[in-house]
Every structure is written in structure tokens, then in C-alpha cells.
Amino acid sequence: SDCDAVATVYEYQHYAKSPEEAVADVLKAGVDINCGTYMLRHTESAVKQGMVKEDNLNRALFNLFSVQMRLGLFNGDPKKDKFGKLGPKDVCTPEHKKLALEAARQGMVLLKNDNKFLPLDRNSGISLAIIGPMATTTKLGGGYSGIPCSPKSLYEGLKEYAKTISYAFGCHDVQCDSEDGFALAIDIAKEADFVVIVAGLSTIQETEDLDR
């Protein structure tokens, strides 16, 4: 689970009527291990009250130990095992960058693609207008992001898809408290074949313990 998420089921969401019921609910829902201490402190009581059965625990433990066995944690010195020498040097290898790209492709959601509008034909000499304050930054991660292997802004990345490309910030930042940049954004949009609007949040709006 996320850290303290099991406690949240009872203490904040009030979905469960007791700590023991919260533990029972998450175990039955498929949680194997709890980041935090809630299951450590309340599972025994939940078992004694008949809310958690031995089968619930066996499933969770089977999954937990299966992963540990696959990692070689019971085969003597883990450093001598398959994954024992992995470190920072392995993060930006071509193999892992390819895997990260595939994960990104599979994780993206295309909400609409009327008449097969996408993908754009990069060989047709199109012009693009890129609009948005986040389009030229390489700081696109959240609060737990690692260090990118080859940071590139969306504006830089889209250059290879267009014969000509122009940019306007539109809004100075993601709060968008001013319309100062709207006129230029409209002008470059009128001149381009296609417009890409880069919209979204920064960590000023949304991060750990900071919800919009």
C-alpha cells in the first residue's frame, strides 16, 4: 500500500468501523504488504476477532516471499545473484531507456483521435505552434522523479516532427493569472498547420501533502 494508506481507510475515510476491519478489508482486497505500521499493530487482533482468516495471510505471504525469492534474497549473498550488482550506472543504458520508452507508450492515454488525425506525418513539412508555460521546461516530473538520462523539453522534442516550429508561453506560469501572453499565442496559432497546447500542473499546485 501507499504509506499509511491502511490507516487512512479507518482514520480519515471512515470506510471501516475499526482498525481491525480496515486491515481485514485491505487484505481481502489484495494488499500484500503495508507501508507503515497499521497491519503490524492490528492484524493479530483482527485474526482473534475472526475478521482475517489464515488463507488471507497465506496469500499475502506467498506473494511477498515469491518476490523475495525471485530477487535471490534467500540464496546467500544477494550481491552475487542476478540483480546484485545493479546500480546507478545501469539506469541510462540503451536497454533500460528502451524499456522506459515502451512503458511510457503503454501508459499514455489518447482521449480522442477523430478520423485518425494522429500520428502527424513528420515528412509532410508541417508547421507547429507550441503553446504553454510547461513546453520549454525539462522539469516535467513530480516530487519523486529521478534524474532524467537526457532531459529534453517538449518543445525541443517536437522540433524533429515539423519543418517549422514556433512557441508562445500563453500564460507566464501554470497559475495563469495574466492574459499578457494570449495575443502572441493566438497569432502563432493562426499561422501554424497544427497547434500543440502543453497544459498541466507543476509541483506548485500538486505534490505530497498539497492537493489542489
Image: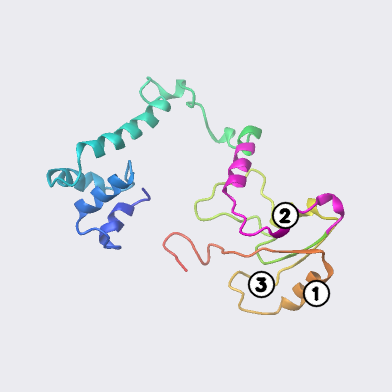
- Residue at mark 2: 118
- Residue at mark 3: 172
Q: List x then y, in percent, for residue 84.
A: 47, 26
CA–CA distance in space, label 2 to label 1: 24 Å
Q: List x then y, in percent, for residue 174.
A: 60, 69
Please say whether residue 108 is one of the residues in the magenta stretch.
Answer: yes
Say above or below: 120 vs 204.
Answer: above
Q: Quadrant of residue 14?
A: bottom left
Query: Residue type at mark 2?
Result: Leu
First along the sequence among labels 1 and 3: 3
Assess whether mark 2 and mark 3 are in contact (beta carbons under 8 angstroms).
no
Q: Which mark is residue 187?
A: 1
Query: Residue type at mark 1?
Result: Asp
Q: List x then y, in percent, for residue 199.
A: 63, 65
Q: List x then y, in percent, for residue 10.
A: 25, 58
**Viewer-nearest of labels 3 and 2?**
2
Instruction: Tell me the element at label 2.
Output: loop
Label 2 environment density (alpha carbons within 10 Å; few <14, some 14–19, many ≥20)? few
Q: Residue at left 53%, top 33%?
A: 87
Residue stretch in magenta: 98-126
Instruction: Tell me the element at label 1.
Output: helix
